[in-house]
Image (cartoon, grey):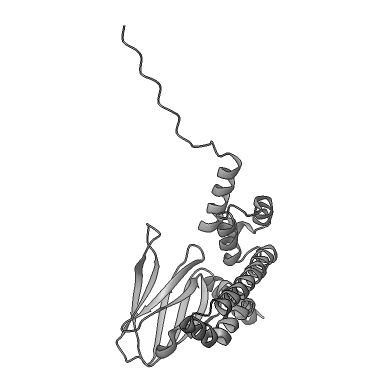
Amino acid sequence: MKKIFFLLSASLLLISCNKDKYTVSGTISGIENGKTIILETQDESGMGLKSIDTVKVENGKFVFEGKALEPAFHTLQIEGVQGKVPFILENGDIVITINKDSIQNAKVSGSYNNDEYVKFNEEIKVIQKKLMDFQSQNMEKMNAAQQSKDTVVINGLMQEFSKLQEEVGNASKTKYVGYAESHPKSLISALIIQGMLNDPSADIKKAEGIYNGFEESLKNTKPGKAIKTKLAEIKNPGVGAALPAPAAAEGK
């Protein structure tokens, strides 16, 4: 009985430890041993990327280990390969599968936010597929019309595309808001509301209501804190504004 209790305790301890650190295990095809993989994050300016860790490829595999204070987007840069692999670095076991020749199709899984990110992107692709299909189906027609300067065909296609853009845009916005409402602990939800508050036409009360429903862990992330600050600025636009300097006294 004591032995069973010990084993259960050890298992629980192991699970608990895994929650306090991250392990990014990757497999990559088409890359020789010794090539460097760089783990990058946004720099302090928010305009670029900086390296936070590097590892070498060994037998087509690589591993990053560490501790994440909160979930945040990071990228992997592979030596000699164009493009980057975006993913959400967070504590837990993350698995990444990469092919050198199709890095944009890298597969990421194994943690809540990464699984949600992949699923959300797939759902958005379905919504936006109409635009892609229209472009591919009418590319030759548009090129022929431009060469013959057929303005009737050109204008007709542009009007159809514009109408379709509006339709897809509205459907995408509905998807974004619906996702944020139904996923109160997803990093994607916080990023959606953060972006929503930068849109002058956004429903601020709606955004605030969704934010209020977030779990505390999400509110305490960088985007969560940014939302709180932005809402305070919108409610009290004068708060924090510099006071005008007093007028100089006139000489006598």
Q: Is residue 212 left or right of residue 90?
A: right
Q: Quadrant of the N terminus?
A: bottom right
Q: Position of residue 109 (x, y in %)?
A: 55, 80
- The residue closer to the viewer here, 223 or 1, is 223
Q: Quadrant of the C terminus?
A: top left
For the point 39% across and 84% down, the residue is 62
- The residue closer to the viewer here, 69 or 121, is 121
The image quarter in which residue 188 lies: bottom right
Q: Position of residue 114 (x, y in %)?
A: 55, 75
Q: Position of residue 198 (x, y in %)?
A: 55, 54
Residue 48 in sight in this render: yes
Q: Is residue 5 left or right of residue 140?
A: right
Number of numbered markers: 0
Q: Position of residue 120 (x, y in %)?
A: 61, 74
Q: Is residue 241 above or below residue 32?
A: above
The image quarter in which residue 233 lies: top right
For the point 40% across and 89% down, the residue is 100
For the point 56% across and 53% down, the residue is 227
Residue sticking out furthest to the top: 252
- The residue closer to the viewer here, 179 or 10, is 179
Residue 221 in sight in this render: no
For the point 57% across and 80% down, the residue is 153
